Amino acid sequence: MKFSNEIKVGLTIIVATVIFILGVRYFEDLPLFDSTYDLVAEFDNAGGLIGGNIVRVNGVVVGSVEDVYISEATGKVMVEFHVDPNIPVTEGTYATITGFDALGVVRMDLVLGPADGPKIPEGGMIAAGTGGDLMSDLTAQAPEMLEDVSSVVDQLNGVLAETNAMLSAPDSDFRQTLTAARGSVEQIEGLLASERDRIASILSNTDSLTADLNASLGEDGEAVAALIAQMEETMATLNEDLERFQETNEQLNELLQKLNNGEGTLGLLINDSSMYHRMDSTLSGLNGLIADFQSNPGRYLKEMKIVDLF
């Protein structure tokens, strides 16, 4: 079955149109076969927004601008756009126009209202929020920025003028400081030049000493390592002895504190002088009794029988 050229051209146009429409919807992140959700927003200034610009929600493309025109009744900018019908555009949602108008990168952002709020009907009006064009903001702030820049330049010119005056005046402190610094540098250069051979000799001797030390350590490395290990072991033993000495010292301090407080017999003897005198008197009487017993034992043994003794 053959088709005429007219039918072929018509079918080609239809297929191309369908592919174009599907492509546009695909690049606008819209459903390919479902219907869209059309809404309207009203702005005082379009900010360079044109048909085809994207519509975003939280940085995600959800639709595109369909038409931008001025309302004859209000004189404001009316923006017709469509978004994915699955987006919950509820009451309280507002739209802003953002981007860089100078580069043609302008978009419309939607800030969604409460998720549990009633959904705005098809073709409903979206409130306009405060957006901003970067170039417009810079233009508005340009006078203030120029004043700041002019103030900085004036201050810089003042600093340069003062610096130039200090450099030009022979008796200025800055000029004298530079002269003194230059003299010091010249003295240092002269000293280095005069002591160049000596410095070279010192560096050579240092290199030689370092080489000898490296050689010694290389030959007796194991002995040095063993010596270091013994020193570490000795230090560990010394630390243990110091800990035990500290414990003994603490016990001795505790004993001395008890003696000072008069605790125990020895503490009472040290702190109570009357007890010392009583003990001294008792010992003196005991010594007299022993001496009398040695000189006159019969006095103490005449009443005792042999049986009692043994």
Image (tube, rainbow, N blue to C red):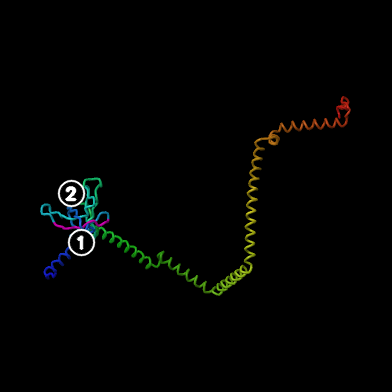
Name the residue at 63% across, 60% down.
229
Q: Which of 152 and 12 is in front in this view?
A: 12
Residue bearing mark 1? 22
Give percent across and percent down for residue 122.
17, 51
* Horizontal side of residue 253 vs 132, given as left or right: right
Frontmost of labels 2 and 1 is 1
- Quadrant for the N terminus in the image: bottom left
Q: Give the quadrant of residue 5.
A: bottom left
Element under label 2? loop
What is the distance, in whole Å, between disc 2 and disc 1 at their CAs?
25 Å
What secondary structure characterizes most of the magenta part? strand
Label disc, if present, on residue 121 of the rendered structure: 2
Residue that lies at the very extreme toward the front in this rendered image:
1
Please, is residue 101 above or below residue 283 in the view? below
Asked whether residue 307 is drawn in magenta, I would say no
- Quadrant for the C terminus in the image: top right
Please, is residue 242 above or below residue 272 in the view? below
Please tell me how crowded label 2 is: few (under 14), some (14-19), or many (20+) other residues with Cα within 10 Å.
few
The span picked out in magenta is 59-69
Please tell me how crowded label 1 is: few (under 14), some (14-19), or many (20+) other residues with Cα within 10 Å.
some
N-terminal of the pair, mark 2 or mark 1, is 1
CB atoms at circles 2 and 1 under 8 Å apart?
no
Name the residue at 18% across, 61% down.
21
Element under label 1? helix
Give percent across and percent down for residue 149.
28, 61
Q: Which amino acid does label 1 sit on?
A: Leu
Q: Which amino acid does label 2 sit on?
A: Pro
